[in-house]
Image (cartoon, rainbow, N blue to C red):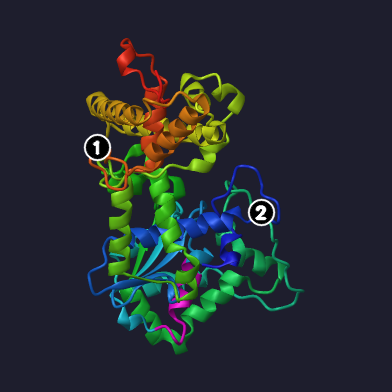
Amino acid sequence: MNSTQLLEEPLAPAAAPLPFDATILFKALHYQLLVAIEQGHDLKPDECLWIEAMGDVTVPGRTQTEVKHFRDDLTDSHLNFWNTVKNWLHERFDCSSYKTLVLLTSQDFGAQSSLKDWNTMSAAQRLAVMEEIAGHTPAAPDTSAPTVTPTIPAPPDAPSLHDDEGTAEHATGRKPSKARTTQQYVLAMERRAALMEVLERMHIAHGQPDLPARLNNYMTRHLKTIRPSLQQQYMDDLLGFMFSAGRVLGGWKITHQEFAAKLTTLAQLYMKHPSEFPQVDKGALEDQINLDEVRAKLFAQKILEIDGEKYLRDAALHRLMAEKSIADLYRDQVLFKHMLDGYLNIHRSNHLAEREAAMLDCENDVDGNKLKKESLKFYLARLKAWPAPFCNMNNTMVEFRNGIYHMLADEISEKKEEEFHWRLWL
């Protein structure tokens, strides 16, 4: 896939892009990576796939796929068709090592296209169609200056001009178009044997879903066990794995074992009933903290009364992390009220017992400053204790458990003896 092809009739925004708008290139790359991901699911244990090294997406010994993310019709003289065949005729490309050569494109055949029945034709019939197409665009003498190719893409809904290229050349005496030149190269007699090898293996996967539809189809098919709120994060992680700098610099090869291992890791992180505690974006939550508002809350007052001002921001962050995790798990139906209530009750009971024991060690202290210091030591000791697993998930975050403490401290208890405090005095 190259930038010249992408600038002809790509799938583009409704407004004409500026000359330096490169989003089209990245959309095309994401489309190519998504096709590679789909093929990764079909890899056998001894297989691998390559990206770009031997074409867009390649499974050695099986399939070589050229990927096109375009909106206009696949007409008879469209360069996506002819350039693809030309690529497969390269002297260092051994098409005989593949069972199938695939042109995968989001384009559908034009209404009058001679290529419509391609996949049901024999190699000889395909050659005849190509020769007939080339015959409709005769070469003209080179009597004019070269035509300058525009660098700004045509509007996405503009009509295709490919079928009229030969007629325009003949009428104006211009230099043969790129399509015509490519046709001549592909159909040259010295390449006929190689061309027949290509035509015997070539399949056109036309009318493929565009990027948003293909992404949605993939998620519908493969992410049924992934929590809905994390499906986009799952896809971002998987695409990042495919496009990692180390992988690209190392040849852009993905083995069956590497792909399977990545899927396993992602399933552990994002599955609907995760075995690993889900990670939380601390940075995004930190921006929500307003200490002036936090100080007015009950849980904050209980920290301030033991001179814990310096720990107040962390406490607010941990509470937000706990609330965010609980809300996400509820939304994805991983967590239910009785499960949360059970976890809260265990920590309330344990805390009351631990505080009672700590208060016994301080029962003879009457110095208020010393009691505050001992209370602060108790607070810090409780925060660093290893957390009990939440819903049997491994690696439950300490910050999450601490957030549970602050949620409990914010409750108003009906019984004074069940109130959640950090102070070691009544």
* Inter-mark Cα distance, 2 to 1: 48 Å
Residue pointed to by mark 2:
21
Where is residue 52 drawn, in percent x and y?
A: 46, 72
Q: Seen in the image, is 49 located left or right of residue 185?
A: left
Residue 214, given in percent of the width and then of the height, sits at: 39, 49
x and y percentages locating residue 192 in the rendered image: 41, 85
Tag 1's secondary structure? loop
Please give the residue where the numbered disc 1 appears in the rendered image.
391
Count of numbered circles in the view: 2
The disc labelled 2 sits on which kind of residue? Asp
Q: Bounds of the magenta span?
A: 81-93
Please determine whether, in this image, residue 191 is positioned above or below residue 135: below
Residue at the spot 70% in from the left edge and 56% down from the top edge:
20
Mark 2 is surrounded, within 10 Å at the Cα level, by few (under 14), some (14 to 19) or many (20 or more) other residues, namely few
Residue shown at 33% from the left, 34% from the top = 329
Q: Nearer the viewer, residue 59 or 300?
A: 300
User: Position of 201 compared to 103: left or right?
Assistant: left
